[in-house]
Amino acid sequence: MLGVSIAPRRVFGVHVDGLGKGAHDIWVCRAHPGGDGIRIESIERLVDLPGGVPEGEGAARTLVGKIREAPRSAWGFDAPFGEVPAAAGRPESRRRTEVERDVGAAASATGEWMRGELLSPLLQASQVCVLPREAMPLAVVGMPPAMTAGVASTYLLEVAPTALVRMLRAEGLKLPNAGESERAQGLRQLAAHGLVRPMTRSLRGRVVADAGRGGLTALYCALAAWRGYRGYDHGVLHQDEDYAREGFIYC
């Protein structure tokens, strides 16, 4: 019988900043995926969500809890999952996926935080799958819903907003980098190209406002998670030794 992955009903984008500064600035974008783009449900700082705290360990526990409570979801993190490469001939401290995506080497503190505080407890949960580090598990078509409880349906993907913006520009979108009016223009571009459905005025305000730069980045992370889940052969990526060990940047 045919096996299929359990498609996510929600996508999340998580922007992580501030490591090594005593506190984390973490933004979380929650959205619903669809054939006509993602519909943004909320964009919030983690500290403003129930149970959210700014400290590193507390922030990690909050995130772990929210991921475990969100079955059938895909999470895009702009923070590294994999290991620093040891292969000869590779630029020092840069993973293959970073070289290919032309993004800066991920900070070691960020990677250690991701692997130790987030991945370590999450990998103990049977429903969580880190792509492409783990093979995407498949449910059998026609399997009773009660039997799919142990099949992973929560997927974690590493994303890079800068790489996503570069790719979208290559696809014809005019996405500026900064400035309040320019961020508003970027949102209109995403809507016009069918990537993000029209947003409420309050959500647009959070993204466009100067204090909402983290919100826009989290939105890009959610968009990259949606595109990443839909647009790649995760089995092929998993079979690649570099990607399975070092991680892969989806965009």
Image: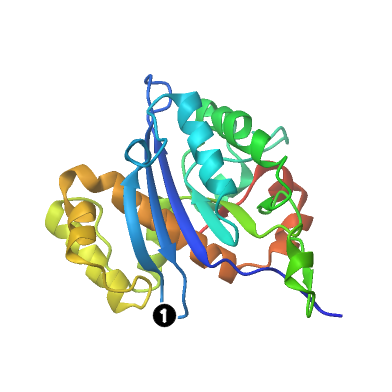
**Colour setup of the view:** rainbow
Give the residue pinned by disc 1: 36
Left or right, 229 with reference to 125:
left
- Residue farthest left in this picture: 181
Q: Would you identify the image quadrant in which residue 174 lies? A: bottom left
Q: Is residue 128 above or below residue 234?
A: above
Q: Image quadrant for the N terminus? A: bottom right
Q: From this view, report whether residue 117 is shown above or below residue 90.
A: above
Percent across and percent down for residue 209 are: 16, 50
Q: How many marks?
A: 1
Foreground pick, 186 / 169: 186
Residue 82 shown left or right of residue 40 in the figure: right
What residue do we see at 78% from left, 80% from top? 142
Give the SS element for disc 1.
Answer: loop
Counting from the top left corner in percent of width and height, residue 69 is at: 56, 50
Task: Judge whether 208 appears above or below 1 on screen.
Answer: above
Front in this rendered view, residue 51 or 11? 51
Location of residue 82 (image quadrant): top right
Residue 179, position as x, y percentages in the image:
16, 51
Compared across the picture, whether 8 is left or right of 16 comes to right
Q: Can residue 70 be seen in this view?
A: yes
Instruction: Give the farthest residue toward the right.
Output: 1
